[in-house]
Structure formats: C-alpha cells, structure tokens
Image (cartoon, grey):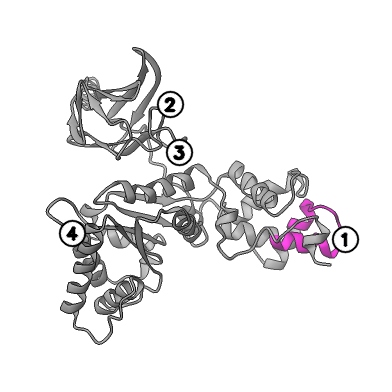
Amino acid sequence: MSYVEHFELTEQPFRLTPDPEFVYWSKQHARAKAYMESTIWLADGFVVVTGEIGSGKTTLLQSFLGEIEDDIVYAVISQTQLTPTQFLQAVLAEFGFKPFNKLKVELLDMLNMFLIEQYSNGKKVILIVDEAQNLSKKVLEEIRLLSGIETHKEKVLRIIMAGQPELKETLDSPNLKQLVQRVRLRFHLGPLDRRETREYIEHRLRVGGRENNDLIADDAFATIHRYTGGVPRLINTLCDTALLCAFSEDKKSVELDDVKSAIEELNWKEVEYSTDTYQQLSPVVSAGQPTYLARIEVRHDGEMVSEHFFEAGRIIAGRSPDNEIYIKSKFVSRHHVQLTIDDFGCTVEDLNSTNGVFIGETRIKKHLIKNGDKVTLGLYELAYADLRKKNREEDSQSKKQNG
C-alpha cells in the first residue's frame, strides 16, 4: 500500500511536475495570469513575469494555454540558450515550418509573412518564452524587433516572457532600454505568506482527494512556512517527505514531529530574514510612506462605493476579484479598463470591454485624463483625482517648517 491509499487520497498531492489541475490561485498568481490574458486583449501586448525557481511560473503558463480559444495561434520556447538565428528557427518550427538551412534574413521574412497572414485570417499570435533569464542580449534585441512587426493598423505579435529574477536585472540594464519601453506589464511572483501557504497545502490535498482539512496538524503549518519561505516547489517537497515520514510510522495524520523529521532528512535550514535567499523571496518594502500619485473613487448613482490610492504603475479595473479595482456588476467586463499612472498623469485604455469606456458622452479607446475627470464603466464611475500638485505643496510646506 502506498501513502496515497493510506491517507485516503486519490492521487499524490505534492508532485513536483507542473499540473494545472492543482493550481492554487493566490492573489498574486491570479494577477500574473490576468496580465498574461491581457496580451490577448491588447494589440501590442508584451508581458514579463518573473519569479523564483518553483514559484509557479510554468504552471501558470500551462493554465493560461489550457484556456485560450481557437482564434489564438501560439509558440512556446523553453530552450533559450540560443543564438539569434537559432531562436528564430525555434519560433518558426513551433509554428509548423521547417526553417533550417536558411539565412537569417529569410527566417525574418518567413516569420513576417506568417504573422501578416494570421492577422488577415483573424488570428492572434502569441510568442511565449519560458526560462527567459537565459536569453542573450542579442536574442532579446531580436525579440524587441519582432514586437514591432505591424500592419497599417496594429502590431501583430503578442509576447509573454517568463523567467527567474535574473531576467529583471537583465531588463534593467541601460542597453535594453528600448526593449523595456515595449513591455506593457511587468510582474514579479513573490512567495506565499503564512496564510496562503496553509491554503495552498489544503487546496492540493482537496484536489488529491482529501476533503477534510485534518490531515496535517494545525501547529505544523508555521514550521512548514519557516523552512520553505512560502515557495510552492519547496512546500511540495517538504509536505511529500512529511507524508512519507508519517506513513512509515503507520500514522493516520501528519504531526509537527513528522514535519521536523522530514526537515532533518532533507537537511534544510530555517529561512532567515537576513539572508540573501530570503531577501530574494520577499517582496521589496521601501522605507517611509508611499507616494501616492492618484486617488480613484468608485461611484454608483453619485454615491462613493470605495476609494483607492495608487502609486505610479498600471491598474486594472473590472468584474474579476483579482483586479486592483473590483467592481461587481454584470455591466462591467471581467477586465474592463486599464489605468496607467506615471509622472505625466493618468492614461485610460479600454481592454476591449463589452459595454465600453466613456468620458462624458464620448466613448474612448485610449485617453489621457485630467484631474476631476469621471470615467464611466457600465453603471459605475471612476472619479480621478491627481495628487501630484498636493504632494508638491506638502513637500514645500514641510521644507519651510524644517528650514
């Protein structure tokens, strides 16, 4: 008898191989997937998702690919230690070509013609590059050039790059500034917190056939989180080993002692807050108070429903709970509108919503709004307040008082 039958499971819950059936949608994983989905809505969609080894990037990609519709044509490149020519050959091979023994200029021509043909046939094309941290800067420059292929109306290639944290560092280098300017959205998958770690474990046990949350003792979860740092792959390894330890002693549940025995077998050390490893796993928290550039009031029938403050960055509003601004209304699309806040103000962009985005009586696709503007989504309004002037006045006042 294996531990699967012993613990009344239907399948092994903590396998290390990515399986979309076991995906646990933490808030940040749902957000990362929404960003991937945005490549479908946005004609110039270009998304970069980074995260530690084992944070769930590949599983997210598989889940995303499992749900795309028939009008999407895609290529997935996961072997990324390639020259520019080899990279183009790999992309064309994924699209069904036999591109070998061709000059680079011929490869580019083949790919360009393919993209234009797909666009003419009403198809959307997505290039997905996994393990993108291994791409050379020459290949990244090739990707930048590919992202610019367009018809007279719009760009014809959407791109998703996923990789380890080194990809963030590479993209931030000065000689890749032009590529970064093409990127629509960047998101880093951090570790699960203690609550999410428990939810993740219990979710995988339920999918594995264990309905009741009684297999792992309550006092074991904090230790699991301390020794895994909230990284899903490490959680799987530790929980699988703990189940084996409990099974070997013919126990019907996993106790704290079993988790400790598993830690000893694995020869793991507790994740320290001060180590470089933990700093990589943890979200970056800046000192002092955040500088908010905008306040968004959500209004219904003239009454304020909620109020949100935002720093520079991109915000998505819609009916799905994973949005920064969640509006529960059948007249609002799942991901309805994107607001981009930067030093110049706030740009609003319709994400191909069903009922449109309006300022006053005018339906807009993309528009730079000003202080006091109201953006209408179905029966709701987003009232925008620009806080930059207020911030400057407060800074000036503070300097006078301290001067």
Answer whether residue 58 is magenta in the image: no
Mark 4 or mark 1, earlier in chain: 4
Quick one: SS at disc 1? loop
Q: Is residue 270 visible?
A: no
Which numbered marker is on residue 322? 3
| Residue identified by numbered label 1 | 250
Q: Which of pointers 3 and 1 lies earlier in the amino acid sequence? A: 1
Disc on the earlier residue, 3 or 2: 3
Q: Main secondary structure of the magenta part?
A: helix
Question: Of the residues under marks 2 and 4, which one precedes in the sequence?
Answer: 4
Q: Position of residue 122 (x, y in %)?
A: 27, 55
User: Spatial distance from mark 4 to mark 1, Cα to Cα?
Assistant: 61 Å
Q: CA distance from mark 3 to mark 2?
A: 15 Å
Spatial CA span between label 3 and label 1: 42 Å
- The tag earlier along the polypeptide, 4 or 3, is 4
Q: Which mark is residue 174?
A: none
Q: Type of residue at label 1?
A: Asp
Query: SS at mark 2?
Result: loop
**Magenta segment, which residues?**
240-259
Horizontal side, residue 190 vs residue 363: left or right: right
Amino acid bearing label 4: Gly
- Report the side of 345 relative to 19 (left or right): left
The residue sitting at the left extreme is: 152
Which residue bears the numbered disc 2?
329
In contact (CB < 8 Å): disc 1 and disc 2: no
Q: Is residue 35 above or below residue 144?
A: above
Q: CA distance from mark 2 to mark 4?
A: 36 Å
Please tell me whether mark 4 sits on a helix, a strand or a loop.
Answer: loop
